[in-house]
Image: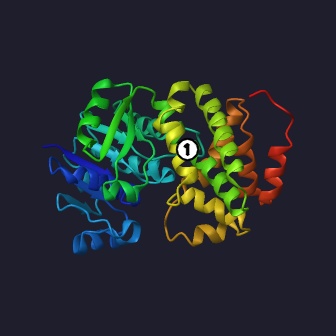
Amino acid sequence: MSKIAVIGAGAWGTALAIVLGRTGANEIELWAFEKEVCESIVARRVNEPFLDGCVIPETVTVTNSLIDAIAGAQFVVSVMPSHHCRQIFESIAPQLKPEMMFVSATKGIENETFLRMSEVISEVVRGKAGFTPRISALSGPSFAREVAKGDPTAITVASTDSELAAAVQREFSDPSFRVYQNDDIAGVELGGALKNVIAIAAGVCDGLELGHNTAAALITRGLAEISRLAVSCGAKQNTMAGLAGLGDLVLTCTGGLSRNRTVGVELGKGRRLSDIIAGMHGMVAEGVLTTNAAVGLAKKMNCDMPITTQMYAILHDGKPPKDAIRELMTRPGKVE
């Protein structure tokens, strides 16, 4: 029996803990920053603030202590919001051990450095703990609530360490949660992060009451620019046609459970970003921050990303969504 520490008890972290706890094969410890989350799980076996209605198995314990969560863990699963990743790993670095296996399940890019989450973790662990961590990335089309319900889901674990990828595949898989292996960690992470930007754009189109033609064009051209940037960063083109690329993009652009798409819908209706975020009650739409990082990374790589650029203008410059759509449609003609 292994101990698996899940660091982050938002909707996605809780859903992963439920998956891991269903078999009863391992000891699962879920770390929550919020005391009310711990109280809710201990008292009622549900995470009322973030994933109400989904029962958490008794095999999952919950704690407010990061040190207790990672003590003796064979696997450390990172599921905190991307802007907290560096700080949390800096705080736990003294307790980390070289034999631990790390799984990054956060979909984001660090704003200041443009590093992927696995790169942030590696940098911190090497600098603060003194060893190079064995690390993988878990991503793919997966709404937390559907995963927690047991709806059939397929996802990808990526690592250049094939033994680690196989171990994660073995420990995370169950009859409702199918895990594929991939060695393209850059592609899997960038696909999972950048699709959130396109999902906000898809929501904007819906909020403007545009039709299916617009959505299809947006998803297709969104995939093209995501792929362009990912490949320029060393990803494989094939990865972008898989679960962590096209699969996650389609889900997040079309599904009603997508927080990023929901933000876009409200923007399309004319609401201010600050008001939308305030109404999310602590939920995180990673695409808002990722848009900043994506624009910076695209400039660094000299990569053209017109949809992402327009989304940045809507989110951070107050550009009217209709003007952004008009500019996209009137760009000079291109060859597909």
Q: Where is mark 1, residue-wise? A: 249
Q: Which residue does the image show at 37% across and 63% down from the upper left?
A: 33
Residue 166 sits in quarter: top left
Q: Is residue 75 in sight in this rendering?
A: yes
Q: How many labels does the image show?
A: 1
> Percent position (x, y) of residue 221?
68, 38
Secondary structure state at the residue bearing disc 1 = helix
Image height check: is 322 above or below 71? Answer: below
Q: Which residue is drawn at 69% across and 63% down?
A: 207
Residue 298 lies, in percent from the top left, at: 68, 35
Around disc 1, counting alpha carbons within 10 Å, would you say few (fewer than 14), some (14 to 19), or many (20 or more)? many
Q: Which of 323 and 124 is in front in this view?
A: 323
Q: Can residue 67 be seen in this view?
A: no
In the rendered image, the quadrant that contains the C terminus is top right
Q: At x 51% / y 49%, what residue is drawn? A: 251
- Position of residue 257 in the picture relative to residue 310 (left or right): left
Residue type at the position of mark 1: Leu
